[in-house]
Image (cartoon, rainbow, N blue to C red):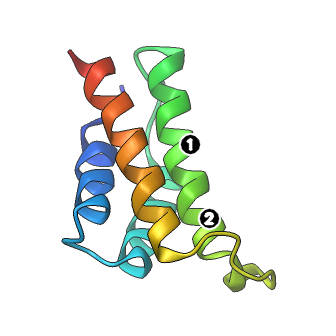
Amino acid sequence: MATLEPFLVLAEAVSEGRISPSEFSLVCLPLYKGYGGPYPTAEQYEAATDLFYVAHDYDSAGIGMPDLLNGDQVRLKAADIARRMRMLLQ
């Protein structure tokens, strides 16, 4: 069963500036794509998916599109998602 903890650690790391948005994207995209499921709840799946899309929208140049988010936006969105994840894990 998939858990949120790896995604929470990643979201907190980028939101706190311990890793860069580029490093975040490099880890988050393959982590999400290769992560085993199912998640315990639909809300946990949604939170992990939201974090994936933050990474995707930052690193969209890799698929031939301009980045939709800048580094500051990534950190703010990741912080919000991390708060949601913490509440879901209580």
Residue 45: in sight, yes or no? yes
Give the quarter of the figure containing the C terminus.
top left
Give the percent coordinates (x, y) of residue 83.
32, 34
Report the residue marked by disc 2.
56
Packing grade of label 1 (10 A; few <14, some 14-19, many >=20) is: some
Say which mark, if any, is on residue 50: 1
Is 77 rendered above or below residue 86? below
Q: Secondary structure at mark 1?
A: helix
Q: Secondary structure at mark 2?
A: helix
Residue 3: in sight, yes or no? no
* Amino acid residing under circle 2: His
Separation of residues labelled 1 and 2 (CA atoms): 10 Å
Give the quarter of the figure containing the N terminus.
top left
What residue is rendered at 41% in x and 75% in y? 21
Whether label 1 touches label 2, CB < 8 Å: no
Give the percent coordinates (x, y) of residue 15.
31, 59
Give the percent coordinates (x, y) of residue 66.
76, 83
Q: Is residue 80 left or right of residue 49?
A: left
Packing grade of label 2 (10 A; few <14, some 14-19, many >=20) is: many
Is 23 rendered above or below residue 69? below
* Amino acid residing under circle 1: Asp
What residue is rendered at 60% in x and 76% in y? 59
Quarter of the figure with residue 13: bottom left
Tell me which numbered mark, 1 or 2, is placed earlier along the sequence: 1
Decide which of 16, 30 is in the foreground and name it: 16
Say which mark, if any, is on residue 6: none
Quarter of the figure with residue 86: top left
Please count the marks in the image.
Answer: 2
